Amino acid sequence: MSKFELFPVVDLNGNVIGSATREECHSGSMKLHPVVHLHIIDTEGRIYLQKRSSDKDIQPGKWDTAVGGHVDFGETVIDALARETMEELGIRAENYFHLITYDFTSDREHELVNAYCMIVDPSTFNPDYNTGEIDKACFWTIDEIDAVKGRNILTPNFESEFDRIRDLIFELL
């Protein structure tokens, strides 16, 4: 990861209208850039979360979506989803489906979030997460997530997205 990575700058429909560096996109410029999220849900209804590395430039040390990352300039959203899943968890993104696309603004950046979901059997799910990206990862129940919301344990982006997808997740199970 380099502050000189090049990201696409997009409109609200995801059409590429330019490019900007990681540093520029995270500097408060509010240039809209696409990201991918993969929610991994087990057949028991638990959600796999990662604890972000303390070295991350955004929300270090907080619990977040199982897989999340930026789309590189010239890369498709689906290619980014596959790359990020392999980089972060060492697994292939398979049998996933699109949940929602929305724009998210924090105090530092503006993202077009493309959220996907993959359902796994907990007895066979054995990721090999990247310790450079992730400090820890495990399944959380919905009640466990609800108990820590608003307490600065989860990323604000995850909390916001969880509220958006919660009902969609229950429909899947």
Image (cartoon, rainbow, N blue to C red):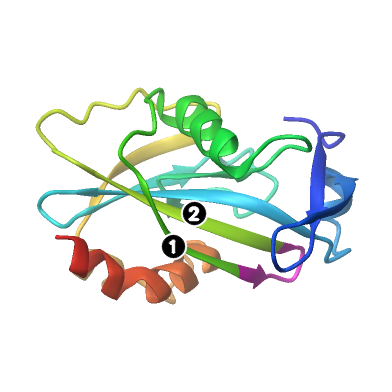
Q: Amino acid at mark 2?
A: Lys
Check disc 2 and report its element: helix, strand or loop: loop
Residue at x 54%, y 39% (from the top left corner) = 78
Question: On the picture, is 143 further left or further right than 90?
Answer: left
Find residue 19 and report its horizontal and vertical position in percent. 88, 47
Q: Which residue is mark 2?
A: 62
Above or below residue 11? Residue 38 is above
Residue at x 52%, y 39% (from the top left corner) = 81
Separation (CA) of disc 2 from disc 1: 5 Å
Check disc 1 and report its element: helix, strand or loop: loop
Query: Around disc 2, counting alpha carbons within 10 Å, would you say few (fewer than 14), some (14 to 19), or many (20 or more)?
Result: many
Question: On the picture, is 75 further left or further right than 10?
Answer: left
Residue at x 77%, y 35% (from the top left corner) = 74
Q: Which residue is mark 1?
A: 153
Q: Quadrant of the N terminus?
A: top right
Q: Amino acid at mark 1?
A: Ile
Q: Is residue 102 magenta?
A: no
Find residue 143 and report its horizontal and vertical position in percent. 19, 70
Find residue 121 and report its horizontal and vertical position in percent. 13, 38
Above or below residue 119? Residue 124 is above
Question: On the picture, is 20 further left or further right than 129?
Answer: right
Query: Around disc 1, counting alpha carbons within 10 Å, would you say few (fewer than 14), some (14 to 19), or many (20 or more)?
Result: some
Above or below residue 167? Residue 80 is above
Magenta part of the chain: 103-110
Q: Is residue 133 visible from the viewing direction of this image? A: no
Residue at x 63%, y 70% (from the top left corner) = 104
Q: Are marks 2 and 1 in contact (CB under 8 Å)?
A: yes
Question: On the picture, is 94 further left or further right than 24?
Answer: left
Find residue 101 and report its horizontal and vertical position in percent. 54, 64
Q: Residue 7 is drawn in which quadrant?
A: top right
Sequence-wise, which precedes: disc 2 or disc 1?
2
